[in-house]
Image (cartoon, rainbow, N blue to C red):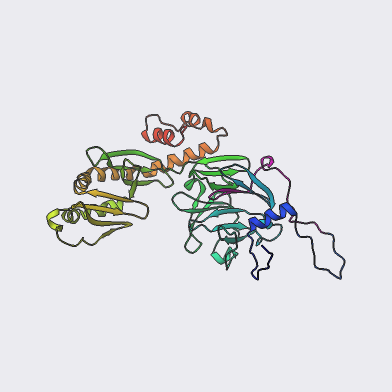
Amino acid sequence: MFPYVTDKSATLSIEDILAIQRLYGKNQNEVPSTRSPSVTTDTRKTSTQNLCDLPYVDNVLVLKHHIFVTYRKSIWVIAINGKRYKGPLALNDYLRFLPANVSINAVYQRPSEEIVMFANNKIYMVDYPSFQLKNGWPKTHSDLNFPAEMRVNAALVTNRGQTYVIFDGDSVALMNECDMTIREYHSLKAIFPGIPSSPTAAYRYIDGSLHFLQKRQYYKFNETTVRILERRYPLTATGYKYLTVGINVKLPCEITVVLGDSHGKEMFLSPTVWSELIEHKRVILSLLQPENTKGKHAPSPIYIGDVTLHFGRINSIPMLRLDSTSSRMTLSNSTVVNLFNLEYCVNRLISSFDNVSDIINKKYSRLLNTAANVNDSTNIQKTMYENEYFDRNDIIDCELIALIFGPN
């Protein structure tokens, strides 16, 4: 055994560097200067403040094994499993590309795993897990065609893969992750009903739940869409597959036809897609007849809106597979026949729901305003039932309050 010197320099990660500095301190050697050193405050000095003693936090970012919490110019790193944490560390020690005296307004992780930070009217895109700034970043709001005076409050990615940036208190921008531009604008209560204006942070936890912070107030949001006036029809003898027609409650509300199964899988069809599916009924049923497809190549797919119909076989039995951007459903010939037999029932429901859509939007908007003025969340339902506008004989009122503002 003998010592040797390699001609290759070792590259340490930011985690290694910070760990060494905590053990041995920072390198105090400085380049000599002919000028007298000025007396300045070290802005990179870490705070000794305990995480649990903070009046509030600025940001929470949940990654695979760690939770990152920022407050002003400090950051804490929490191990999810052991629930131990390191810190506080100086924010621009951990993220060296950040300028001094900067704090992060909002942060989220993209579906492609890069981390996006909003700080001082600039947007930073950071590689994960190296935490290195990607080439070409940061960018300004004008570079991405964001509103010039946009004040970002929070940002997060939902379980459906949609990226929302909350800004100016109660405005929401839906991001296009392909080119990092804003696709469309919404109000906060339309996308996240029940969440008060001006949240200071938002994140998605490892169990998929969405959380919003407003200083010391904490809100948990159920992303599951609530459906009212719902009718369900079995498509198989056991009800393993079914068809549901109802109204998704949001602003504006949305009539939807749903193909589902007992495993919880659901495929959403708009009334337009349903109508076009019915128009193709004869062709679809013909292509599912064994005598019409035996010994032949699989028929070409049929495209209806955002749904693609594929024809194939399982154990020599003709099958129809419906593919959308978020789901897939396979149906046998008999199930497809049962589906089309519901044509007039579904059409009648869609027509009825269309007549009450405006009423639902008005009632739901009024209930949201009522809920926003109730300080104790346990009293929301009671307050709504006592409101002068509540009609106990109206099924819309009853289902809106029970299903959306109930204890669950």
The spot of residue 399 in percent (x, y) is 39, 34
Res 59 seen here: no
The x and y percentages for residue 155 are 55, 52
In the rendered view, does 265 fall on the left or right side of 90?
left
Question: For this rendering, which residue is in front, 5 or 129?
Answer: 5
Q: What residue is shown at x 57% (from left), y 34% (from top)? A: 375
Residue farthest toward the left in the current orientation of the protein: 291
Residue 334 percent across, percent down from the top left: 19, 46
The residue lying furthest to the front in this view is 1
Q: Nearer the viewer, residue 107 or 360?
A: 107
Quarter occupied by residue 283: bottom left
Instruction: Inspect the magenta stretch and tell me whether residue 61 lies in it.
Output: yes
**Magenta: main secondary structure:** loop
State the extent of the magenta-drawn residues as a range: 40-68
Residue 49: x, y in percent?
72, 44
In the image, residue 272 above or below residue 55: below
| Residue 282 is covered by the magenta coloring | no
Q: Nearer the viewer, residue 156 or 10?
A: 10
In the picture, the quarter occupied by the N terminus is: bottom right
When asked about the image quadrant of residue 312, the answer is bottom left
Q: Residue at x 56, y 66 (%)?
A: 143
Could you tell me which residue is drawn at 34 percent across and 38 percent down?
229
The image shows a total of numbered marks equal to 0
Let me know if residue 302 appears in the view.
yes
Residue 206 located left or right of residue 248: right
